[in-house]
Image (cartoon, rainbow, N blue to C red):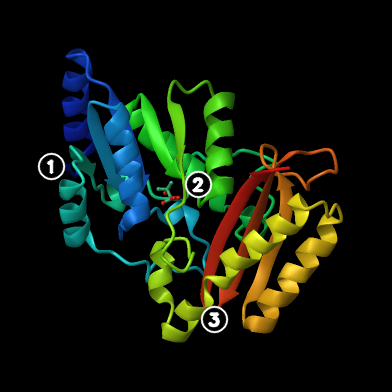
């Protein structure tokens, strides 16, 4: 696997690939890779001639009280996993390479509305940071397609809208969530959980499943379904941030005639904030 730290070296290599007619599949990550990330690489491998992963813990998408400093950085292991997964290239820039003029005054890319609800309400500015870095990565790499996990469902919808609204010539591919045997969605932040919390964490997925089953069986009072799930989670030891039945495309509160639904959930276990979702039709 070729490793690039500088934008110049990366762009030079990608230019020559493009000139020889190869397609580029981009897999943006923040590292500390797990099977969820490897599923993105596998999906990219199926479509693109050259699979380029990026590892960049993007300071712009972390709030002042969030886990930027403690975010797990495991570059050596990540390189081995990517090589074994058949990834062709890895871009691993320093913060100064991505933000040469610093973070203050950086031009921001913002998707209004969609970015402000759910995770955006709890993490103000988070999606502006995500969109800005993803836009920079798209401009630097000009990929044919880019791969994002459906675990970050709102992020995926925000990126899709940014790409459409700004006429970016890149195909956005969502890749299904990978779960452990107990149903817990894989996430780098699961590494923060202690043994007891790890045992409890799959309840988030259990509650999503229970809520979707209830709705599919005819329950149309979504607020009641949400309240019951929140109560179950909080009783078990979570601190629920949100548990909301939404229209799967707009992420607005679901209306009774909506058929394509997603339940979005975020909940704290101790100091760790977990997110998960379940999309279904009725
Ligand atoms: O999902 C992530 O890991 C990050 O938000 C992303 C898309 C790599 C942007 O930093």
Circles 1 and 3 in contact, beta carbons < 8 Å? no
**Residue 153: x %, y % from top left:** 56, 47
Tell me the residue that label 1 is attached to: 1
Residue 68 in sight in this render: no
Query: Residue 5 is drawn in which quadrant?
Result: top left
Whole-angstrom CA distance, mark 1 to mark 3, is 38 Å
Query: Residue 158 is drawn in which quadrant?
Result: top right
Which residue does the image show at 33% across and 55% down from the upper left?
35
Assess disc 2: are there few (<14), some (14-19) or many (≥20) residues with their C-alpha within 10 Å of its C-alpha. many
Tell me the residue that label 2 is attached to: 150
Tag of residue 270: 3
Whole-angstrom CA distance, mark 1 to mark 2, is 26 Å
Which residue does the image show at 48% across and 59% down from the upper left?
62
Q: Nearer the viewer, residue 141 or 234?
A: 234
Q: Quadrant of the N terminus?
A: top left
Q: Is residue 158 left or right of residue 114?
A: left
Secondary structure of the residue carrying numbered label 2: loop
Circles 1 and 2 in contact, beta carbons < 8 Å? no
Secondary structure of the residue carrying numbered label 3: loop
Secondary structure of the residue carrying numbered label 1: loop
Assess disc 3: are there few (<14), some (14-19) or many (≥20) residues with their C-alpha within 10 Å of its C-alpha. few
Residue 136 lies, with reference to residue 186, above or below; the image says: above
**Residue 263: x %, y % from top left:** 67, 53
**Residue 192: x %, y % from top left:** 41, 75
Whole-angstrom CA distance, mark 2 to mark 3, is 24 Å
Residue 173 lies, with reference to residue 242, above or below; the image says: above
**Residue 180: x %, y % from top left:** 41, 64
């Amino acid at each position: 696997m070729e490793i690039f730290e500088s934008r110049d070296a990366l762009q030079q290599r990608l230019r020559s690939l493009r000139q020889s007619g190869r397609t580029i599949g981009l897999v943006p990550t923040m590292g500390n890779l797990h099977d969820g990330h490897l599923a993105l690489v596998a999906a990219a491998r199926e479509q693109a001639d050259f699979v380029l992963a990026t590892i960049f813990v993007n300071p712009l998408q972390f709030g002042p009280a969030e886990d930027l400093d403690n975010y797990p950085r495991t570059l050596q292991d990540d390189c081995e996993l990517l090589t074994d997964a058949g990834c062709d290239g890895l871009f691993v820039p320093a913060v100064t390479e991505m933000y040469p003029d610093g973070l203050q005054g950086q031009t921001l890319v913002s998707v209004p509305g969609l970015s402000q609800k759910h995770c955006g309400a709890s993490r103000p500015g988070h999606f502006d940071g995500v969109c800005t870095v993803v836009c920079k990565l798209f401009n630097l790499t000009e990929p044919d397609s880019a791969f994002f996990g459906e675990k970050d469902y709102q992020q995926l919808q925000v990126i899709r809208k940014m790409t459409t609204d700004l006429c970016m010539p890149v195909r956005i591919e969502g890749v299904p969530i990978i779960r452990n045997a107990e149903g817990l969605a894989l996430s780098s932040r699961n590494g923060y959980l202690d043994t007891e919390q790890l045992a409890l964490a799959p309840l988030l997925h259990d509650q999503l499943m229970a809520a979707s089953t209830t709705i599919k069986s005819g329950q149309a009072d979504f607020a009641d379904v949400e309240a019951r799930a929140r109560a179950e989670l909080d009783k078990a030891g979570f601190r629920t941030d949100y548990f909301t039945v939404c229209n799967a495309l707009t992420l607005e509160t679901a209306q009774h005639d909506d058929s394509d639904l997603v339940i979005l959930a975020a909940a704290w276990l101790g100091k760790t904030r977990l997110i998960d979702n379940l999309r279904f039709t009725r």
